[in-house]
Amino acid sequence: MTLHERLGDLQAREEARFRDEHPRSRDLAEQARSHLVGGVPMQWMSKWPGGFPVFVAEAYGSRFVDVDGHEYVDFCLGDTGSMTGHGPSPTLRALAEQATRGITLMLPSEDAVWVGEELARRFGLPQWQFALTATDANRFVIRLARHVTGRPKVLVFNWCYHGTVDETFATLVEGEVVPRRGNLGPPVNPRETTKVVEFNDVEALEAALAPGDVACVLAEPALTNVGIVHAEPGFHDALRELTRRTGTLLVIDETHTICCGPGGYTAAEGLEPDALTIGKPIAGGVPAAAYGFTDELAERITASLDLEDVDVGGVGGTLAGNALSLAAIRATLGEVLTADAFERMIPLAERWTAGVEEGIVASGLPWHVTRLGCRAEYLFGPDRPRNGTEAHAAGDFALERYMHLYALNRGILLTPFHNMALMSPATTDADVDRHTEVFRDAVVELAAAG
């Protein structure tokens, strides 16, 4: 019997255990179907393994408790949204204090000035604006890039992730740009708006930029949502040189790669983008995002705007830059996601990676594990992928769901969309070691089954 033939039996065993041990979550999931589409408040939540999601009672630090009383070590951390750990005290204090003074006014607060200065210090870009999500930040920067360059196209890397931005839900099939599988109701065929090349392919990048019709390259500095794909030596130098040579703006999306340090991959590796976007963790889980520019680009944007029309140009939002979110960002950047915190978080990811590697070796399975800052992930293939296509080819949905459910049944939460673990300032050695134990048991049993 092959591994995948045996996997069905193992999955059924874990699903039965999950149902038996989560009666309250099961009942709430059934009740939710009456008024929540798919029984969940947001469709992605239906992807958790087990047939229904666990319903959360409370969360704190690196852990949460479900409505059935089970405690979990959380390595998903809201898929980076709670990278701070759940409910960091400085952020909670700031929220409580600001809520009594006003939540949203469509006027600036003093915190906005501090946050702009801090973002400039961390990322090296001097001019900033705010949004509620990184998706919005990316949308706004794309609009501004097309506006100031007069060019129609955006270039992204195959199997990238930049939130729910229409222009980025594209992939390559036999060299042609097509909608990605699962792309719901695209407003136009993405070949009209987007060029796609493989990550690390400098030759293809040069050819795509040569016609001079690309307004901006929107790039994660390392791919993160299809498994971690690292930039090869010299790739970022080539990317910057080619964008400058062709008059193309370079936009770096640090929403996931903030895992590399206080200033993300940009500061850690000395990148020089024209614009930068970030969201998810910067306000400790409160919806908030930011996008920054060089002085030169900010001047081009400002000079091109008409004051009378500044509120109807498709950039901004009534709740963007609200006082509550800015207070949360100030507390989170000032006291939670600090340099000292990353000095603890990154070694924890190294420990997690070493534990997974030991389990892979013990099992003999042809898998590998890789790390980026305080983020780490294992993939179902022996070789480190060079691009998104190779990483995607190493995916195995059935095996992924089994590994997630096996861990969940033993008190470990991983990100449901891939095999990612993230460390927070509250994560401990004991949290990591518990995952090492559970992972080793899972893969040793899988190897024996195969």
Image (spheres, grey):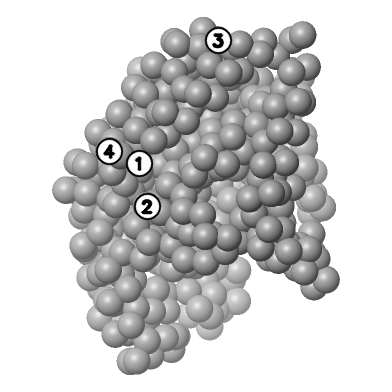
Question: Which kind of residue does numbered mark 2 sit on?
Answer: Ser
Residue identified by numbered label 4: 429
Of pointers 4 and 3, the one earlier in the residue sequence: 3
Extreme-front residue of the structure: 20
Residue 322 in view in this figure: yes
Residue identified by numbered label 3: 366
Residue identified by numbered label 2: 62
Where 86 sits versus 151, above or below? below
Of pointers 2 and 4, the one earlier in the residue sequence: 2
Residue 142 % position (x, y): 55, 53
Which class describes the residues within 10 Å of circle 1: few (<14), some (14-19), or many (20+)?
Answer: many
Front-most of residues 285 and 262 = 285
Question: Which kind of residue does numbered mark 1 sit on?
Answer: Asp
Query: Do callouts 4 and 3 mark residues in contact (Cβ within 8 Å)?
Result: no
Q: Is mark 2 on a helix, strand or loop?
A: loop
Question: Which kind of residue does numbered mark 3 sit on?
Answer: Pro
Quarter of the rendering occupied by the C terminus: top right
Q: Distance between the residues labelled 1 and 3?
A: 26 Å
Query: Do callouts 1 and 3 mark residues in contact (Cβ within 8 Å)?
Result: no
Of pointers 1 and 3, the one earlier in the residue sequence: 3
Q: Is residue 56 left or right of residue 82?
A: right
Q: Distance between the residues labelled 2 and 3?
A: 30 Å
Q: Give the residue at x 77% y 37%.
A: 181
Residue identified by numbered label 1: 431
